[in-house]
Image (spheres, rainbow, N blue to C red):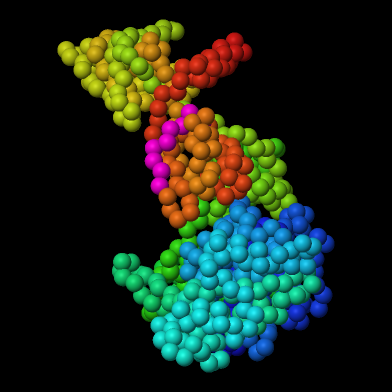
Amino acid sequence: MDAKNKRNFILLGHAQSGKTTLAESILYLTKAVSRKGKVEEGSTVSDYSFDEIERKTSINLSLLFCDYEGCRVQFIDTPGYADFSGEAISGLRAVDSAIIVVDAASGVQVGTERAWQMAEEAGLPCMIFINKTDKEGVDVNKVLADLKSSFSKNCVIIKSLEDPLLMEAIAESDDTLLEKYLAVLRLSLDEIKSGLAAAVGKRKLFPVIAGSALREEGVKDLLDDILQYCPSPLNRSPVVTFNPLKTDEMKEVALKEDAPFSAFVFKNTSDPYVGQFSLLRIFSGTIAANSSFYNVNKKAKERLGQINMLQGKEQRSLENASCGDIVAIPKLKETVISDSLSQEKEQFLFEPLVFPEPAISSSVKVKSREDEEKIAMALHKLTMDDPTFRVAHNTETKELIISGLGDLHIEVMVARMKKRFNVSVELGTPKISYKETITKSARVQGKFKRQSGGRGQYGDCTIEVQPLERGKGLEFVDKIFGGAIPRNFIPSVEKGVRQAASEGAVAGYPIQDIRVTLVDGSYHEVDSSDMAFQIAGAMALRKAVSEAGPALLEPIMEAEVSIPEECLGAITGDINSRRGRIIGMEIKGKTQIVRAQVPLSEMFKYSNDLRSITAGRGAYLMHLSHYESLPQKLAAPIINQYQASKKHEEVSH
């Protein structure tokens, strides 16, 4: 298939707007399938994984294709839930245009706004399909007005190419056409068609088609308009890459079949049905089965066997693939998501994908000993397939933490661990990585003396502790004079002090922002040893912290919350209720950006609360800012619980 006869697009929109049903209708209408599947029956081509069939909703992106009017059409069905927005972000990099699906009964919803924004950021031409017009009481004109006010006044239903309003909009998108139109107030049919395609390609016009995917109404019109007005891989917007040898130097890809090979890996997938695949979009050149390519990121040659075009979980083997094709290559050893592929002698480095940061975290504990060995492999495979799912080991709290874009995301990943890898886990709220510090100075002695037959143990040191400003860590100062402690034992005292500081004195958390000064001590000619002075140093620090007004420090996060303007009052009130403080605000388009500093302990369920307050239209990012003193009324129960557990341990021993 010549690249000029290829079209590829992505289906975006709010959850349950009918994207998967539309995909099924396109396949059925073009005879790519002989029977039309249904979401509620779990029989659609694109929703084939066990969790999609169970939940009756899309969770993963799915690749589909059909032949229509002499053209090869490839398209991607994506989930509408924000928890799985990483799938849409991946798919957007593989296509040349976007179809935004809108529920006629609901109009513009949160997911519609998100879809529009994503397509706009990707610079993709857009068409809009108003779906479910067969529902009772639907007013298409009202939905169109909603689209115009929410997105662009240039969202237009093409009733006739002779429509004066349409002609005027096309003329306004091009200076040459505008000049002619103003002179004679008309454009020829060819000028209208080519002008409309150019305007769509430049995102100056957004054709709107109304219909019902369930009844296949408007689906043929949509396909006809995609072929007529959406760009082919040859005339899409330019693709700019970096020069691998000079990453500050830009390099444009020649969008041709006879140009050097270049491709981008937009997704990895490992599935019981399809196995391990790297999904890639070819931007230029051609690649053959049983050949090789150069992975620019890994600086390595990679052999490939089969090349497949995917129809959901089904594979169609290809001898070669070229400019504009979206293909799946199995069992690559080096290649992962965001890798750039080319020839070694002509390299292209594509910009990597950028995914949203996780919004919610849970601690994970395996239910059985047998699962401990399996969990690392299971989590590794899940993170390879989904970059928005993260795994970390908190060395301070000794917890395994999983993070995702929402409760549903975490729930789906835990279900996959159970179904695919037979690993069962229990989820909990992650512990907070508090720190211990002091609020005043103290001077104490740490003396370790033990005599139990033969050589004894003796170490004696006196230290002074003082509070330091936040973020200074732990300073150790040696002020020993006159040989009170031999020089060779002073590093042992410091080692003991730092070891005790890592374990905590009053609540089991690391001690920081403290200066420890070694001022005096004594030793025994025979019984003193490195170990004795380490123990003495540790004893001294624990005692000193207990006497120097111990306090807990809590992590303070800097959050950036994006919300509709009408939610500003509710959000600022909610942040204040979380012991947070607003540090700045700015307006970006129709969105209000609120910057705040909030304790981490108050943010674990923020994702759900923000969704509730903003009706799903809010989003946030956060990172660690600094540590601050935890109020005494909150610190006391934590300290008391730790001390009680220590006493219990001592009694049981």
Tell me which corner region of the image, top left, top right, bottom left or bottom right, holds residue 132: bottom right
Q: Residue at x 46, y 20 (%)?
A: 631
> Residue 306, percent across and down?
62, 77
Q: Residue at x 38, y 13 (%)?
A: 549
Q: Give the left or right position of residue 103, taking residue 549 as reference.
A: right
Q: Give the left or right position of residue 216, taking residue 144 as reference.
A: right
Q: Residue at x 64, y 44 (%)?
A: 407
Q: Does 600 lie within the magenta span?
A: no
Range drawn in magenta = 578-586
The answer to whether any part of residue 455 appears in the image is no
The answer to whether any part of residue 371 appears in the image is yes
> Residue 467, percent across and down?
31, 20
Q: Between 445 and 199, which is closer to the camera in this rendering?
A: 199
Q: Between 505 and 300, which is closer to the camera in this rendering?
A: 505
The C terminus - image quarter: top right
Identify whether 316 is placed above or below 107.
below
Q: Between 552 and 221, which is closer to the camera in this rendering?
A: 221
